[in-house]
């Protein structure tokens, strides 16, 4: 933990709580996203991963706790505030329109236009540039419809869409869940390249292989609490699995697991 | 061009140096803009095989119908009948263009035909009983259409009632409008020079030629300018040869039909002179250009396709899905009003049954046969016009053959079913191959 103190986080949540009615989903959660690092967010179903992501995305409000960007507290009222801060979320269902092509999807809702006329040439040029800067070589044409893309390519387009707007932080919800081996490879390479460009990346995943392959840090959630926030190099596979399933592993984890309830 | 593209294809399989470093990437590596005619042709074939047929079924249908009818009846291919066909197709094309907007969202408007009838009734009443000018009366009719669309759209978007049910209710209720205003068994004749003239008068021959030339030259200039600017910036574009073929094809169609319609087509050429493009045609073409522009060049059009393709994705992208639905129904019903007025112009009267007959099914058939999907997300204004010509050809040809009208119903129903089957099958192939 101390070795990380040098880099200050791009985005930080401190002591965040969130309840839905009587269900207390997030308990005093601390979460930080660092520039140039992939932070893996792991946890069992119902541990609060999705709630945490939606809280960061501004879809859910916080009951209390701080939301800091570049060390300064910000007020966030909704998803638009969050994207204005340079934070983009790629959800599992990707939200792409099958009948539109890659360029049209990347600019959906934020089309470039002059006097209300679409500037297709500028959009295509910028989409091409973004894909090239991410070293994406797997699509045949940026003018092909998204319906014709494979799962990995669709994920690539969704991620490229997220970084198109000079975003600084990208949150990826299970980006490899439905992909085969080769496509998982493509997407993980892309995730690594995002971090190498200095973006803060959050990877939500159930797959320990993926996590250990690309993540710099691992934050494990257990029943809405942060069980551990450790550099990937300092933990083993088994420890992470124990943190996910029991909230505790050796010296790591929640001190008083037995009292932790939802 | 062909050499460089051949080189890049051969490099593709083993190309792609290992990514990861900050290697400078030439944007042209990302993809290969369709460079050669061969590429474009292969791409087109792949799309056809994948079920993306566009207007091809409609064009084939038109060829088949023209062949059959011209073999069966020697009067079918006369210029007189062709001009008639253009006039008959006008109101169907306009109604179908309006329906494209609703179909794009995966909705349906069953009331469009009767909305047109109701609007035309208002227009005729204003002309005949209140002595309004033709444009005042026309605007009144279109405004009524817009209001009908607004109400339907609000009910569909904000109360989430299926459009099928809402518009079925309007289909029934709106038939009351002409019945009440005109009275059962009556009819409202109007003889306004302009509105009636849309169907029975023609553009002066010289003006027709000028307009046709403007269209062809304008299209050619736009296509070439687009080719030039896109290829200069290294963006994907169609090969030059294909652009030229397109321009020539358009020129042949536009100038060819202008030449045909500029001949004297009077049955008795020694006594009468009937020549020139019927006024309906420029009305349809202007609407076609306007809506094509809206659908392909504006944010509004792009967002319509997005909502039709994936409403949830559109909503997350910040598009107001409900407002888009309302807008689509308003456009549809307004176009229905124009269509109703054109239909009234053709017969010179409005009667209680106006718009309640086959009009709607013809128009849905026209849109679908032209390549608009009933499932949303796919369709162009041009498809509706081509489809409208196909649909209008059927009653025209059967009428010449003196067939009993029940045949007309069966054939039209069959064509609609065929078009919907083509749509469903091509959709299945699309989801299988993902084109």
Image (spheres, coloured by chain):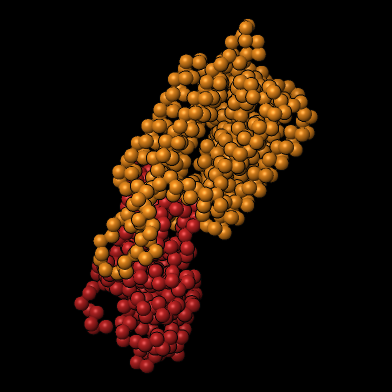
Chain colours: A red, B orange
**Height in image: A221 above or below A70?**
below
Q: Residue furthest front?
A: B3
Residue B216 in the figure: left or right of residue B429: left
Where on the picture, by quarter, is residue A1? bottom left
Instruction: Residue B198: tell me if it is visible.
Output: yes
Nearest the eye: B242 or B366? B242
Q: Residue B350: percent from the left, percent from the top?
A: 66, 24
Q: Residue A157: percent from the left, percent from the top?
A: 40, 60
Residue B65 in the figure: left or right of residue B249: right
Nearest the eye: A231 or B164? A231
Q: Residue A163: percent from the left, percent from the top?
A: 33, 61
Residue at 77%, 29% in the rendered image? B403
Q: Residue furthest left?
A: A6
**Height in image: B409 above or below B75?**
below
Q: Residue B75: percent from the left, percent from the top?
A: 68, 22
Nearest the eye: A154 or B145? A154
Q: Residue furthest bottom?
A: A250
Residue at 33%, 44% in the rendered image? B231
Nearest the eye: B316 or A240? A240
What is the total number of numbered labels drawn onto the structure image? 0
Residue at 22%, 74% in the rendered image? A7
Instruction: Residue B175: tell me if it is visible.
Output: no
Residue at 32%, 79% in the rendered image? A217
């Amino acid at each position: 933990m101390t070795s990380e103190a040098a880099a200050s986080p791009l985005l930080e949540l401190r002591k965040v709580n969130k309840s839905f009615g009587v269900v207390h989903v997030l308990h005093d959660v601390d979460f930080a996203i660092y520039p140039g690092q992939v932070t893996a967010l792991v946890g069992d179903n119902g541990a609060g991963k999705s709630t945490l992501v939606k809280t960061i995305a501004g879809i859910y409000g916080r009951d209390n706790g701080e939301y800091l960007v570049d060390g300064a507290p910000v007020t966030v009222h909704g998803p638009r505030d969050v994207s204005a801060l340079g934070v983009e979320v790629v959800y599992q269902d990707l939200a792409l329109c099958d009948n539109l092509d890659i360029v049209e999807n990347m600019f959906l809702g934020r089309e470039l236009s002059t006097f209300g006329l679409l500037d297709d040439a500028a959009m295509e040029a910028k989409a091409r540039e973004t894909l090239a800067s991410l070293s994406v070589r797997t699509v045949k044409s940026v003018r092909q419809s998204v319906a014709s893309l494979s799962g990995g390519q669709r994920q690539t387009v969704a991620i490229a869409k997220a970084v198109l707007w000079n975003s600084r932080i990208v949150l990826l919800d299970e980006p490899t869940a439905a992909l085969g081996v080769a496509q998982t490879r493509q997407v993980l390479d892309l995730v690594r390249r995002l971090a190498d460009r200095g973006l803060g990346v959050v990877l939500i995943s159930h797959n320990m292989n993926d996590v250990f392959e690309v993540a710099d840090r691992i934050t494990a959630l257990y029943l809405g609490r942060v069980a551990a926030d450790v550099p990937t190099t300092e933990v083993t596979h088994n420890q992470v699995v124990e943190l996910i399933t029991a909230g505790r592993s050796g010296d790591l984890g929640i001190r008083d697991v037995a009292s932790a309830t939802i | 061009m062909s050499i460089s593209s051949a080189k890049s294809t051969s490099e593709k399989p083993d190309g792609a140096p290992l990514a990861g470093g900050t290697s400078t990437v030439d944007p042209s590596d990302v993809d290969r803009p369709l460079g050669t005619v061969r590429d474009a042709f292969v791409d087109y074939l792949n799309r056809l095989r994948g079920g993306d047929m566009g207007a091809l079924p409609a064009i084939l249908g038109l060829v088949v119908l023209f062949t059959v009818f011209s073999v069966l009846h020697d009067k079918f291919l006369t210029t007189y009948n062709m001009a008639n066909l253009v006039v008959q197709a006008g109101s169907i094309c306009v109604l179908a263009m309006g329906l494209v907007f609703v179909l794009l969202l995966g909705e349906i408007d069953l009331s469009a035909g009767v909305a047109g009838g109701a609007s035309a009734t208002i227009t005729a009443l204003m002309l005949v009983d209140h002595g309004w000018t033709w444009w005042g009366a026309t605007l009144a009719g279109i405004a009524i259409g817009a209001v009908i669309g607004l109400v339907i759209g609000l009910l569909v978007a904000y109360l989430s009632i299926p459009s099928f049910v809402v518009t079925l209710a309007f289909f029934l209720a709106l038939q009351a409008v002409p019945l009440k205003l005109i009275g059962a068994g009556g009819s409202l004749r109007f003889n306004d020079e302009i509105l009636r003239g849309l169907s029975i008068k023609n553009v002066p021959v010289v003006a027709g030629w000028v307009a046709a030339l403007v269209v062809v030259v304008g299209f050619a200039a736009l296509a070439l300018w687009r080719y030039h600017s896109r290829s200069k910036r290294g963006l994907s574009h169609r090969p030059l040869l294909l652009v030229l073929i397109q321009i020539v094809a358009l020129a042949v169609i536009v100038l060819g039909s202008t030449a045909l319609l500029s001949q004297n087509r009077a049955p008795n050429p020694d006594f009468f002179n009937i020549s020139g493009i019927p006024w309906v045609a420029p009305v349809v073409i202007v609407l076609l250009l306007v809506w094509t522009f809206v659908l392909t060049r504006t944010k509004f059009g792009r967002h319509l396709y997005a909502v039709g393709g994936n409403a949830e994705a559109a909503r997350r992208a910040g598009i107001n899905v409900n407002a888009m639905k309302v807008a689509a129904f308003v456009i549809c019903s307004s176009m229905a009003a124009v269509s109703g007025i054109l239909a009234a112009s053709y017969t010179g009267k409005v009667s209680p049954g106006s718009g309640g007959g086959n009009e709607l099914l013809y128009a849905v058939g026209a849109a679908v046969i032209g390549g608009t999907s009933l499932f949303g997300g796919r369709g162009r204004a041009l498809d509706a016009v081509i489809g409208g010509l196909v649909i209008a050809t059927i009653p025209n040809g059967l009428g010449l053959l003196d067939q009993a009208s029940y045949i007309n119903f069966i054939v039209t129903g069959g064509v609609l079913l065929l078009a919907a089957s083509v749509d469903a099958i091509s959709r299945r192939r699309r989801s299988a191959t993902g084109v």
